[in-house]
Image: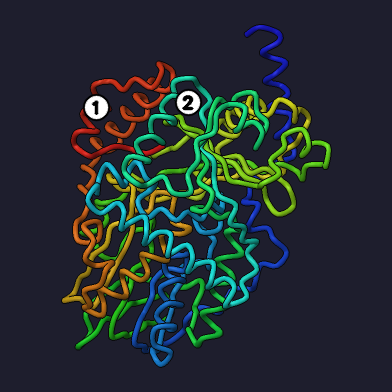
Amino acid sequence: MAPSAMSRQADWTRSLSEAQPVPYWLEDPGKPRPEPALTGADTCDLLVVGGGYSGLWTALNAKERDPGRDVVLLEGREVGWAASGRNGGFCAASLTHGLPNGLARWPEEIHRLQELGLRNLDEIEAAVARHGIDCEFERTGEIDVATETYQAWALRDWHRRLEQRGLADGIEFLDADAVREQVASPTFEAGLYDRRGVAMLHPAKLAWGLKQACRALGVRVYEHTPALELKQYGAGMAVRTPYGSVRARQAVLATNIFPNLLKRVRAYTVPVYDYALMTEPLTAEQLGAIGWKNRQGLGDSANQFHYFRLSADNRILWGGYDAIHHYGGQVRREYDDRPETYAKLAEHFFTCFPQLEGVRFTHAWGGAIDTCSRFSAFFGTAYQGKVAYAAGYTGLGVGATRFGADVMLDLLAGEETERTRLEMVRKKPLPFPPEPFAWTGIALTKWSLARADAHGGRRNLWLRTMDRLGLGFDS
């Protein structure tokens, strides 16, 4: 390695010297105390298993639909401790993991899906205000940026296609000068600015606020209470926990990446580990050097992409790029920390923002998300419609989980609604194959995606085949 390269690498690693390997969001001093664990037996109308966004929105929406419904929520550790408290805080209107994925998979429904997604984001904003949830909600939008010339041409072509399909409302193409006027990086060559379809928020505060809103409406929340077994009990369902049990008329399974109590659902998802860094608060001079006065979220256009945004106290969260799947689909605490990825992310950060040389990172962390072969949520029922589930959000669940909660409640009610009529609700993705085929396929796809990024976006035979089959692995 050349001396100058070694010096730059030393700068990147020095920026990480004081970074704590814990999620920045979960260290907030306003973190609430956990609720006591369930001991003994309880009964209810609706049992919700899982205390992330999916379960919290389900419990809250169930009570708002029917205040008299008796609802219990079980969380295996603490509300929001997993993906719901570790993500980047991008609350997107998209229900389909982005418009390109939605248009490719459900072209006949895409206008309806876009309309439902924007309505869902409006309803999230209204719920945050209605329940007084202080989660630093800012509807600032998001810019997808091109950092290579071929990506800039692709963004321009994509915007033209959206205009032709009547899908470009609120979406603006920015050339190099226009995008750098929004955020100053020498790497930005173009951008696609979605002005109303994305909000920024504090992810852990949203989860904690939803828990408080649920409790205020009468939901009984038990934390440190993992659900161990699900079975029929008379006309309803029963769940066994370490120190007790819950009998319910109906149940919702909202465990996402963690093993579903319905074994047949497990093959549809695999865990992927994502990582992020958080800087120290930027000074006024540092903020001035990069602009970013409109506080949008940003993401780049590579297959192996980064996402980045400003926090309320003007730190930069910088995440993404590496998406790590471990053999056998293991979810383990030790996987939450990955120094080699942190070093790579730090290098990329200073390439994007060289004017921030000397900035330090205070936090570095990771966590698992669930992905499925179509990258967006799927739904279903079991036990003659007494159990509903949703999973597979693939990292865009901050907003889409609220929609998923309404889908599950519709399914439990046996109602045909504008949501349950959707093809994306009625049909499931293809399951992943067993090991070693799943790990091998994912590894080959990741290698191919990296190769495409290095060769002007050209997709090799493997990726083209996965595209034709509607399969893949999202970085």
Task: Report the side of 262 relative to 122 (left or right).
Answer: left
In the rendered structure, find residue 464 and report the number of the disc placed on it: 1
Which of the image's four quarters has the C terminus? top left
Task: Report the side of 403 relative to 472 (left or right).
Answer: right
* Quarter occupied by residue 338: top right
At label 2, counting other C-alpha atoms closer than 10 Å, the crowd grade (few under 14, some 14-19, many 20 or more) is many
Indicate the amino acid at tag 2.
Ala
Q: Residue at x 25, y 25 (%)?
A: 462
**In this orientation, which residue lies closer to the viewer: 204 or 266?**
204
Q: Secondary structure at mark 1?
A: helix
Scheme of image coloration: rainbow
Q: Residue at x 44, y 56 (%)?
A: 93
In the rendered structure, find residue 208 and report the number of the disc placed on it: none
As drawn, the residue found furthest toward the top would be 2
Which of the image's four quarters has the N terminus? top right
As drawn, the residue found furthest toward the bottom would be 68
1 or 2: mark nearer the eye: 2
Q: Is residue 320 something one can see in this rendering?
A: no
* Quarter occupied by residue 472: top left
The residue pinned by badge 2 equals: 152
Give the vertical position of 311 relative to 29 (above or below): above
Give the vertical position of 163 relative to 69 (above or below): above
Is label 1 in contact with label 2 (beta carbons under 8 Å)?
no
Across and down, in percent, residue 365 comes to: 59, 45
- CA gap between label 1 and label 2 equals 22 Å
Task: Report the side of 128 relative to 450 (left or right).
Answer: right
Across and down, in percent, residue 26 comes to: 63, 58
Task: Report the side of 390 relative to 33 (left or right).
Answer: left
Q: Secondary structure at mark 2?
A: helix
Across and down, in percent, residue 169 comes to: 44, 49
Q: Residue at x 19, y 33 (%)?
A: 468
Indicate the amino acid at tag 1.
Arg
